[in-house]
Amino acid sequence: MSFMLAQNRKALLPIITPPQPTPQEKYASTELRYYLDLITSAVFEIATDGEKGIFIRHADENAGLGEDGFEVKTYERSVLIQGGKRGVIYGVYEYLEQLGCRFFTSTCEKVPAVPDLLAPDFNTRQVPVFEHRDHNYYDLSQHGRFAVKMRLNGNSPRIKEQFGGHQQYTWFVHTFDKLLSTEEYGKSHPEYFAMYNGVRSLRDNRTQLCLTNPDVLKIATEKVRAALREHPETRIISISQNDHILGCQCEKCLAMDKEEGSPAGTLLRFVNAIAEELEKEFPHVVFDTLAYNYTRPVPHITKPRHNVCVRLCSIECCFAHSFEECDDDRGLILPDGTKTSFINDLRNWGNYHDRLYIWDYTTCFAHYPAPHPNWRVLQKNMQSFHRNHVKGVFEQANGAQRGGVDFNELRAYVICKLLWDPYCDVEKHIREFTDYYYGAAGVYVRKYLDALCDKADRENIHVGFNDQPVSQLFEESFLDELDAIMDQAQNAVQGDPLCLWRIGKSRLSVRWVRMKRAAMLRNELDPETVTRFFTDWKAYGLSRIDEWVSMETTHRALLSNLWRGTEFYDHWVNDEEREEF
């Protein structure tokens, strides 16, 4: 049944909330009012009673919607929007999208002007397949209210409670040094730390803990207890290995690893013990750990407790092809010398554990601007996660504090859509975004993305999360092709200053790769080109080019004929040290 919401700039129905609305119901109703006013130029009112209207309320706990699910129903010249704590807000945005709104970025929204607004005959019930949805692209991590519109609920956006809140994550991975630091215990108790080649390693957070030492377990348990008491809002706390390549090699740890068939078993025994000890005091907390690098294979014996979450990491993968289809040979090498693929480990963990989370990667962290050909695999991989019983996904992104290039605004938007529904119409979302955000240049942006992915597919080019731009994906003739497409894009929006600005920003990707390859591969460095790039980069309000160092350090590395600014710092593990371990 269709009916009018507004006509001739007059609102025909009120927005109706419960008499004492929760902060989330109140926010949902004021957001709906704002956008309906904006669409119609009418003035909608919010009331607390009435027979006909747009009803906004939390769903009954027995409705099966959880915190994030919602229902939208039209009936008898009324609309019902109901949902969980966040779901009631999500339901409002879903309804607005049905009315033609789109929320592309925190500063780019499409809102139609429709003075005579018809309420569509619309009924939907949506519960997300992933209970935890998160990524750290700048626009969403810095703008919590936009993150609500995109239905993220993880820790990165830090969404305030009145806007629905988020799943508070304390100690965001690689936390062994928070449990026992070498600074605090290294001199007095070197036995607390991992052994390599018969020596206890005390290199700050570049070592691991000796997980079979009972004192380590006692101290770690009390450290976790203290952190949870300090942060009572915590829903997830991470008890996870440092960002290092190998676990403790002492006799006891190696024996346990062998018994379990994987160091993950030794780690899970440690995490399970902490989770069991603290469960009574913190029954609402999930204790999170990593299946990362050497802990990625599934153990043979120990399973995670019901309040333990294993987060499987895809760091070794190629991201130009889907996990299920890729034939890259860079798989993880196990202690016995054999290799295991990520998709194999994903399937094993999915069958082994009923609360599997994922840590995935969506950019080149060594060279943020580099064109990253993952556009066709984002959906395939998200569907693989769902098929293998994954409950939560974090997509690690370009986390630079002022954003980046390589069409990251589009990528962030697409990832949000997939986190909510892995089976959504991605092509439609890409088309809608590019046509609005880039105007007449949108068709050429899609042509650019297709050319990039076509080349990776056609020539079977594998792309890792940290690769230098040396493969044939970035050969000069192909960079010429990409630039030619962007010339067309730029020409198409000559009369549109905003779209022209956005296209100019996106062209920094190829500019960076050309300049870096010339310096590193051919020892060619043109001062004017370099200076112009970095001044333009800053003029667009951008900061980091590399995950780990500042723009200024990246510039110095370019002048010093170094691939990355991290090479200036001693604490980065080099290849010789890796072989040692």
Image (cartoon, helix red, strand yellow):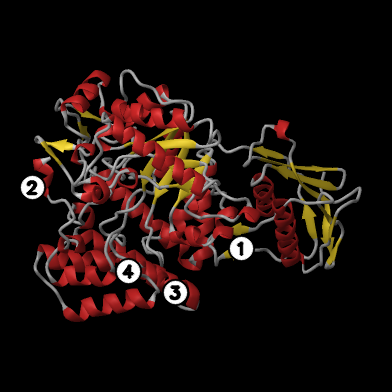
**Residue furthest to the bottom:** 528
Nearest-to-viewer mark from 2 and 4: 2
Nearest the eye: 458 or 165: 165
Q: Quadrant of residue 99?
A: bottom right
- In primary-sequence order, the first of circles 1 and 3 is 1
Look at the image and tell me whether residue 464 can be seen: no
- Pick the front one: 239 or 496: 239
Q: Which residue is mark 1?
A: 110
N-terminal-most mark, 4 or 1: 1
Q: Residues within 10 Å of mark 4 (few under 14, many from 20)?
A: many
Q: Nearer the viewer, mark 3 or mark 2?
A: 2
The residue pinned by badge 3 equals: 500
**Viewer-proximal residue, 254 or 447?**
254
Q: CA distance from mark 2 to mark 1?
A: 53 Å
The answer to whether mark 1 and mark 3 are in CB contact below 8 A is no
Mark positioned earlier in the residue sequence (2 or 4): 4
Of the two numbered discs 2 and 1 on the same chain, state the one appearing first in sequence: 1
Q: Give above or below for 172 relative to 323.
A: below
Q: Residues within 10 Å of mark 2 (few under 14, many from 20)?
A: few
Distance in Å between CA atoms under marks 3 and 4: 13 Å
> Badge 2 is on which residue?
576
Q: Earlier in the sequence, mark 3 or mark 4?
A: 3
Between circles 2 and 1, the one closer to the viewer is: 2
Sequence-wise, the earlier of marks 3 and 2 is 3
* Rendered location of residue 13, percent (x, y): 86, 56
The reply to whether callout 4 and callout 1 are in contact (CB within 8 Å) is no
State the separation of the CA atoms marked 4 and 1. Answer: 26 Å
Q: Which mark is residue 508?
A: 4
For mark 3, give the secondary structure. helix
